Amino acid sequence: MPRSGEPEPYALILRRYRTFLALLLCTVAAAAQPATETPPQLLDAFAFRHIGPIGNRVSAVAGVSGDPRTWYAGAASGGLWRSNDGGVGWEPIFDRQEAASIGSIAIAPSDPNVVWVGTGESFIRSNISIAQMYHVSTDDRRPYFVYGNRQDGPSMRGPSRILYGGRTQGIPVGEWHSVGGCEVGFSMVHRADPDLVWTGCYDGQLELYDLRSGQSRDVSVWPLAIESSPASDLEYRFQWTAPFATSPHDPELVYAGSQYVHRSRDRGQSWERISPDLTTADPALMRRSGGLTLDDAGPTIAPVVFAIAESPLEPGLIWAGTNDGQVQLTRDGGESWINVTANLPGLPPLGTVRNIDPSDVDAGAAYVAVDRHQEGDTTPYVFRTNDYGETWTDLAAVLPRGPLANVHAVREDPEQPELLFLGTENGLWVSFDDLPPRRACVRSWIPCAGRAGSTPDSLTWRARSARPTPGRRIIGPPSGGCSATNSPRRKTVSTLLLSARWPT
């Protein structure tokens, strides 16, 4: 390079001139080329990315002309949202309005601050919690976490309490997150590793979710999809919410149900079939479903095993119930099975065995809830056996009848077996009358106070060691509902959790 004030060498001037001339010729040549369309295959590399807003159903989107960073999104029941950073963050801007249902959005071309929206009628769905939880379980953390699968949403995990906020504020939605799986089935912590979660999905899909990495692994018994196929064509008939259970004796042992009971001892790496077909295998129940449009989705698959439970007192004593009314058990881990359906007094055929609850105090005792509303029968059917299914007692004789009387779940209190809890289509019931020597008959059921119209789909006990203070227990039938009081003889504290759905 020449020093300041000295003329540039001729070679350097010539080089710059040639460079300018080459760029000019390239520009002219490019301008002379005919316009070509972008090959469609180049667009295949672009993928959609969810940018919000979180939750709800987006029904309308509009952007500001000339401003690629400002966008508006209208939700079907969540109002109007705005993003000023291209969708990275969203803020609600319509919460003070009476209507929350947005159908269309328009930005005024003359002023981007003028936003027109078309709304529907006032909608309260965003202000109250409406959902159907299929099943609920807990872990042993302190505070313990609750797990479940929610219809039309993901599986969920959240704390039972938080260390911030006021008593009336509740647990914010941000404390909850998905643990794999999908909208139906079970979510349960692995009994040998609390950082692993068994989580289900429809049609028998099963995953093992790792809380440490946030990743899940498919451990399904049968990895092929069953949708759009009649039950008669399926090698394994898995229902919409196929049963899953863990063993109370072996933390590595789990069970899953199709028309068979399947068992895994290696965290889902392999499965073995430990039962014959426990259903009636009636061909009339395995035909294609639907009318003009064939459905053949998981909820219509039958006959299948619908409930599985192993006795907490006797290893290898496994109960299984089906959605065509069969109740069977094995006492040798699946080597042989006994069908005890015929012993259930007054039970019509084709009911769905919703749950089986083996007793915590008597190995030969178990409770069975059967639902026949799909057969047009809403009669409550609840039974108990004290002799491994040889004889049964009808526990529902005095329950009220009606269009919402069908039963979903029955549970025995793990500490006080004289207490029984029952979930029906329209509420939760408790019985205090099952006291020795009156164990042969439950004389009365009392409705528990709670939200009217709620439907308990499942009942789950969570037991933990008690502190020196006495436990808080339900011990007597007050007038008009359920109450709790201190029971000095309790050595553990048990919490009853129910998964429910509310009318929409």
Image: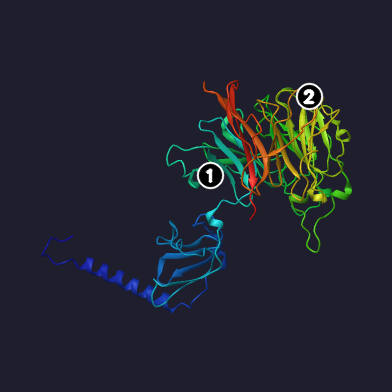
Q: Is residue 27 visible?
A: yes
The label on residue 2 is none
Q: Camera-side residue: 288 or 7?
A: 288
The colour mode here is rainbow
Identify the image quadrant of the C terminus.
bottom right
Question: In the shown orientation, is residue 469 left or right of residue 368?
Answer: left
- Nearer the observer, disc 2 or disc 1? 2
Q: Secondary structure at mark 2?
A: loop
List x then y, in percent, for residue 386.
80, 26
* Left or right: residue 503 compared with residue 102: right
What residue is drawn where x is 44% and y is 37%? 163
Badge 1: residue crowd in 10 Å (few <14, some 14–19, many ≥20): few
Kind of residue at badge 1: His
Left or right: residue 278 versus residue 86 is: right
Residue with the most extreme left position: 5
Q: Position of residue 239 (x, y in %)?
A: 75, 45
- Can you say whether 438 is above or below 71 in the image? above
Q: Give yes or no for contact between labels 2 and 1 (Cβ–Cβ under 8 Å).
A: no
Rendering coords of residue 32 (x, y %): 43, 79
Name the residue carrying label 1: 177
Q: Quadrant of the N terminus?
A: bottom left
253 on left or right of 37 = right
Write down the residue under mark 2. Answer: 364
Residue 181 visible in rendering: no
Q: Give, as a three-letter code, the residue at label 2.
A: Gly
Mark 2 to mark 1: distance in Å?
40 Å
Taking the view exactly as shown, the residue that stands out farthest to the front is 479
Q: Residue at x 49, y 43 (%)?
A: 170
Looking at the image, tell me whether mark 2 or mark 1 is earlier in sequence order.
1
